[in-house]
Amino acid sequence: MIEREKLKNLAETVQLFKIFSDLTRLKIIDLLYTGEHAVQEIADKLNTSQSAISHQLKLLRDLNVVRTRKNGKQVIYCLRDSHIKEIFLIGYSHATECD
Amino acid sequence: MIEREKLKNLAETVQLFKIFSDLTRLKIIDLLYTGEHAVQEIADKLNTSQSAISHQLKLLRDLNVVRTRKNGKQVIYCLRDSHIKEIFLIGYSHATECD
DNA sequence: ATTTTATATGAGCGAGAGTTCATATGTCAA
DNA sequence: TTGACATATGAACTCTCGCTCATATAAAAT
């Protein structure tokens, strides 16, 4: 059997990897990697509905992956911490270097 | 819009991260990290049904995450490449270091 | 050969997750 | 205030995915 503490760590690791396990979310992260963007901008660039983007952004916000600031009517999103950037980059390079 | 090639890369990255996005699979990977194990051994140690483990092992085998050898009636599984080990370890440490 | 043990696999079920659709909230402009 | 624009959100629908259950395959033991 697995000890309680290790199981908790593995479960948290799963949660972390789940962030990157959806194409829409990964596109968002990839886009925000280059800098901050407003919601409609993201939706347009990713050719995805505003609602779908907004739902995913809420998710990412709740997980502290992104942070926001307001600019008039707009809400501007950007990546919050460098952990996320690092893991994304490592996964991305691993996934692509074997082509 | 995202260029075709980049989209393909992002999609492959998603597939990579999905490997680690299930607790059963992560438990298996964690266990195999310590060395090779037979199917029933894995099922017992993870307190999970043989069938569930076998299904996940098939998935991991198809994705070239694990490799097998036979020992009589038993099939012994172990991690195939060090990429997987590295990504798992990075995710695991990122997920756990912030407690 | 038959039985027992180890593993694999297909079908079906149920839970979770992402999308759409409709609508609410909020902010600026006229 | 009213209208237009930007974002958020709840509900319903759908689809994916991991599990169970039953069964198939395979290899050793008797």
Image (cartoon, coloured by chain):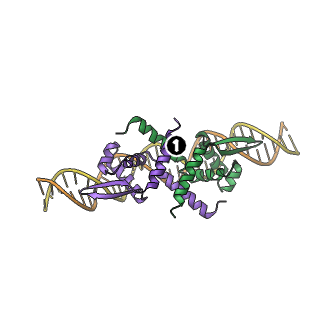
Chain colours: A green, B purple, C yellow, D orange
- Name the residue: 44% across, 51% down: B85
Residue C26, by quadrant, is top right
Secondary structure at badge 1 equals helix
Q: The residue marked by circle 1 belongs to what chain? A: B
Structural crowding at the residue carrying mark 1, measured as other residues with C-alpha within 10 Å and reported as few (<14), some (14–19) or many (≥20): some
Q: Is residue B89 above or below residue B70?
A: above
Q: Is residue A67 left or right of residue C2?
A: right
Residue D2, by quadrant, is top right
Amino acid on which the number 1 mark rests in the picture: His
Q: Is residue B86 left or right of residue B9?
A: left
- The image shows residue C14 at horizontal and vertical percentages of 43, 44
- The image shows residue C21 at horizontal and vertical percentages of 64, 50
Q: In which quadrant of the rendered image does the N terminus of chain A lie?
A: top left
Q: Nearer the viewer, residue B34 or B53?
A: B34
- The image shows residue A54 at horizontal and vertical percentages of 65, 46
Q: How many marks?
A: 1
- Name the residue: 58% across, 52% down: A26
Q: Nearer the viewer, residue B92 or D11?
A: B92
- Name the residue: 46% across, 48% down: B88
The residue under label 1 is B94
- The image shows residue A93 at horizontal and vertical percentages of 55, 57
- Name the residue: 32% across, 49% down: B50
Q: Nearer the viewer, residue B98 or A16?
A: B98
